[in-house]
Image (cartoon, rainbow, N blue to C red):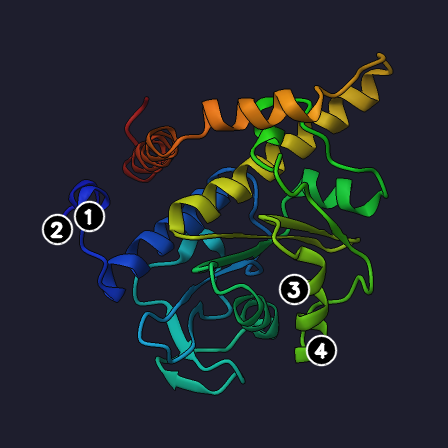
Amino acid sequence: MSSSDALHSQDDSIANVLDNLARAHRILEMEGHGDMSMGHFSYRDPHGRGLWLKRGNLGLEEVRAEDYILIDFDGNVLEGQGLRHLEWPLHAEIMRARPDVQVVGHSHPFHATVFGASTAKLQPVNNHGVWFAEHGVPRFDATSHIITTPDLGKAIAQVLGDAEAVLMANHGASFVGRNVKDATLAGIFLEWAAKFQLSLAASGLPYEAPDAEETSEKHRRIYPERARDNYWMYFNRKLDRLETGVAG
C-alpha cells in the first residue's frame, strides 16, 4: 500500500497505525521538533496490553513502522527489539490517567522549550494558540529533569489534567490526542503558538488576547474534524515532497 493509500485507508490495524505514527515522527522533525535521537510518540495498544513506543537511539526523521516496542504500563518489554526510552513512564502514566488519550508525544521543540523556561502563560493570540482554548497549556515545573520514574510520570499527568499539551520547564513539551492526527497537530501548533507569542513579546508592542467566548467559538469554527483531516493530509503531502525530493 502506498503512503497516500494508507493515509486514506480506514484500516485501524496496529501495523497501519504504527506506519502513520512513524510518519508523524518525521513530520515533527520537519516542523522543528528534532533534537538528535530524543523525542518519541506512543500509541495505546488496542488489545489492552500497554503501549507501542518508538525505540531509542533514533532521530525523529529516522522512524519507520517497524521501529516500535510494545511495553506494558510497568515498562516491561512484551514485543519488539531495541532500546526502551528512559522516559517511558511519561507515556505510561499519562495513558493511565487519561483513558481518552490514544497517542502521547514528547519532544524538545525550540520555541516551546524557550517558552516553557519562562513562567509566562501561553495565550490564544494566534490561530494555533486557539487549538488549546478549552484547557490551556499548563506548565510542569516539579523538575527540569527527564521523566524516568512512575512518580514523575504521575506528577506530569496530574499537571496535564484534561489539557492537550503541557510545557515542561527547561526541558521540552508533551502533547496528546485521541488519534495520531490530533496528537501530531497538537505538537505542531504548540510550537507555532509559542514562536508567535515569543515574537510578539519581543516586538515590545502592546497586545491583548481575544476573550474566552470568542476564542471558544473560533476553536469550533476553525478546527472541526474536516479541517483536522485537511491539515493532517497537508503535512503528509509536505513530508512526501521532502522525502522524494519533489519541489512543492
Tell me, yes or no, whether the two marked residues, 1 and 2, touch with CB atoms within 8 Å: yes
Mark 1 — residue? 6
Q: Amino acid at mark 1?
A: Ala
Chain-order first, disc 1 or disc 4 = 1
- Residue shown at 66% from the left, 71% from the top: 153
Q: Label 1 to label 4, Cα distance in Å?
A: 38 Å
Expressed as whole percent of the image width and height from the top left, the position of residue 121 reads 79, 37
> Residue 201 lies in what quarter of the image?
top right
**Residue at the outermost top position:** 205
Chain-order first, disc 1 or disc 2 = 2
Q: Label 1 to label 2, Cα distance in Å?
A: 6 Å
Q: Amino acid at mark 4?
A: Asp
Mark 2 — residue? 1
Q: Is residue 179 visible?
A: yes
Mark 3 — residue? 157
Q: Label 3 to label 4, Cα distance in Å?
A: 10 Å
- Residue shown at 83% from the left, 38% from the top: 120
Q: Amino acid at mark 2?
A: Met
